Image: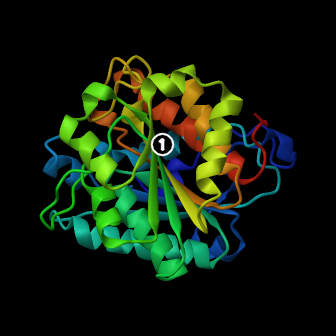
């Protein structure tokens, strides 16, 4: 299915912008120089396969678009441009990540914030490469990860959906890492030691739950303020499996959607945050499309936060 068929829906009005839906405001790549926000799909689950997870996330970008299409648009006159998809063929993950990096850097160069629709969480590595390509080697980059897992596994030169942050921290002395939602029993003791070795800042799932939104926002803003630019990455397996069953590694003790929404609003409203990605939505194992719809709703929160349209915390 082409993007023209995905971005379709009912039209309440063709003139009154207050009645527009997403499908009425999305533009193609020809409008990239005018876009406030650029959408980029990453159709890939090769990293999940390498990590012995459940494949299927490659279908998520178009599924999330289809769920966004009928949603009411609250971004007023802002322009949303869809750059289309990067696809991973023949298990060539590293080539696909480089292609994603080029598109992300192009979006930054046009003055847009970027929203990347993954894909497995290996999406993040191409996302990061795009910002580094755009900024050069000297700028400091912060990565805020909303995730149940550290994804700091050894990689032996081969990337997967469980290695990206270790790759970045080993390669880039000007990068820092903060993860919210860590599951105690979703990570080995060795990974907690690795996190300590790399000076990773993290908040366990229990701490996030117990924090009020204002307190959580202050912690997030403090992290962001340390860097020249920041990217936000959401792994949907951070949510409890009742809310998000369609992921590679579902969890009974994940965060609730309201907590994740609060994190996204607090982070993406900050001017130093340049982009957002969503990963690990797997339509093949999604009960009733719940994870896809939630993923689209959280993506909408990121977009509106970039545009200054999200409610204040």
Give residue 148's quadrant in the image.
Answer: top left
The correct choice, above or below, for 200 with respect to 149 in the image is below
Q: Is residue 29 visible?
A: yes
Residue 70 in percent (x, y) is at 62, 37
Q: In front: 201, or 105? A: 201
The correct choice, above or below, for 273 with respect to 228 in the image is above
Q: How dense is the environment of label 1, judged by Cα within 10 Å: few (below 14), some, or many (20 and up)?
A: many
Q: Is residue 69 visible?
A: no
Q: SS at mark 1?
A: helix
Q: Residue at x 72, y 61 (%)?
A: 79
Left-right relation of 70 to 58: right
Q: Residue at x 48, y 42 (%)?
A: 64
Residue 14 in percent (x, y) is at 80, 48
For the C terminus, which image quadrant?
Answer: top right
Give residue 110's quadrant in the image.
Answer: bottom right
Q: Residue at x 32, y 39 (%)?
A: 149
Q: In front: 102, or 205? A: 205
């Amino acid at each position: 299915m082409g993007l023209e068929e995905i971005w379709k829906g009912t039209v309440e009005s063709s003139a009154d912008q207050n009645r527009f839906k997403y499908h009425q405001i999305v533009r193609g790549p020809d409008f990239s120089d005018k876009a406030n926000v650029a959408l980029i799909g990453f159709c890939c689950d090769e990293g999940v396969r390498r990590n012995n997870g459940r494949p299927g996330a490659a279908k998520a970008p178009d599924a999330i678009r289809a769920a966004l299409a009928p949603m009411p648009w609250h971004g007023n006159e802002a322009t949303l441009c869809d750059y289309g998809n990067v696809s991973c063929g023949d298990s060539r993950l590293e080539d696909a990540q480089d292609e994603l990096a080029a598109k992300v850097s192009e979006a930054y160069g046009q003055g847009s914030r970027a929203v990347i629709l993954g894909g497995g969480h290996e999406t993040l590595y191409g996302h990061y490469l795009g910002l580094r390509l755009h900024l050069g080697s000297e700028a400091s980059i912060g990565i805020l990860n909303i995730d149940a897992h550290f994804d700091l596994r050894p990689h032996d030169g081969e990337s997967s959906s469980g290695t990206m942050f270790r790759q970045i921290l080993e390669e880039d002395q000007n990068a820092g890492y903060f993860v919210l939602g860590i599951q105690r029993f979703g990570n080995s003791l060795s990974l907690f030691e690795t996190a300590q070795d790399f000076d990773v800042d993290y908040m366990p799932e229990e701490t996030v739950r117990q924090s009020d939104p204002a307190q959580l926002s202050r912690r997030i803003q403090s992290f962001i303020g340390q860097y020249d630019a920041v990217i936000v990455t959401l792994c949907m397996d951070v949510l409890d499996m009742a809310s998000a069953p369609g992921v590679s590694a579902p969890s009974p003790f994940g965060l609730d959607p309201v907590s994740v929404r609060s994190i996204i609003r607090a982070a993406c409203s900050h001017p130093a945050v340049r982009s957002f990605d969503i990963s690990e939505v797997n339509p093949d194992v999604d009960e009733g499309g719940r994870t896809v719809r939630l993923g689209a709703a959280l993506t909408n929160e990121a977009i509106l936060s970039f545009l200054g349209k999200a409610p204040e915390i």
